[in-house]
Image (spheres, rainbow, N blue to C red):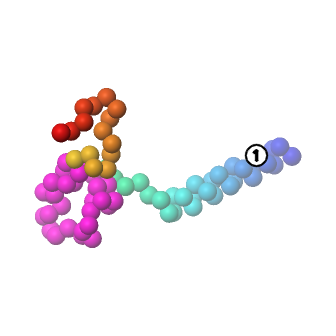
């Protein structure tokens, strides 16, 4: 009985992982600001390479500063 439950649990875990992989994808770090915090739907040719917001990771707008850092003035 316990072995059967273990097999069922393993099958459900695999199924859940598959479903999750179909819905949620990792966003590459170099475009996460673009993906989640940009008003534009798409950049004009050449604009992405020089985008200050992307290059500077939105200057910490999305992430709180580390606990051991001084606040910006």
Category of crowding for the residue at label 1, using alpha-carbon neighbours closer than 10 angstroms: few (below 14), some (14–19), many (at least 20): few
Query: Percent x, y for residue 37?
Result: 30, 59
Q: Residue at x 47, y 59 (%)?
A: 24
Q: Is residue 61 left or right of residue 46?
A: right
Query: Percent x, y for residue 62?
Result: 31, 50
Q: Residue at x 15, y 68 (%)?
A: 45
Q: Residue at x 28, y 55 (%)?
A: 33
The quadrant the C terminus occupies is: top left
Using the image, determine if residue 31 lies above or below residue 64: below
- Counting every numbered tag in the picture gives 1
Q: Is residue 23 left or right of residue 36?
A: right
Q: Is residue 53 magenta?
A: yes
Along the viewing direction, whichever of 73 and 4 lies nearer the viewer: 73
Q: Which residue is mark 1?
A: 6
Query: Percent x, y for residue 58?
Result: 23, 51
Q: Residue at x 75, y 49 (%)?
A: 7
Location of residue 49 by image quarter: bottom left
What span is in magenta?
Answer: 30-58
Callout 1 secondary element? helix
Query: Percent x, y for residue 4?
Result: 81, 49
Q: Is residue 66 left or right of residue 43?
A: right
Q: Residue furthest right?
A: 1
């Amino acid at each position: 009985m316990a072995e059967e439950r273990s097999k069922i649990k393993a099958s459900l875990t695999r199924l859940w992982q598959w479903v999750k992989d179909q819905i949620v994808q990792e966003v590459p770090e170099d475009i996460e600001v673009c993906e989640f915090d940009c008003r534009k739907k798409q950049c004009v040719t050449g604009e992405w390479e020089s985008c200050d917001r992307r290059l500077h990771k939105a200057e910490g707008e999305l992430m709180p500063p580390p606990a051991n850092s001084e606040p910006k003035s």
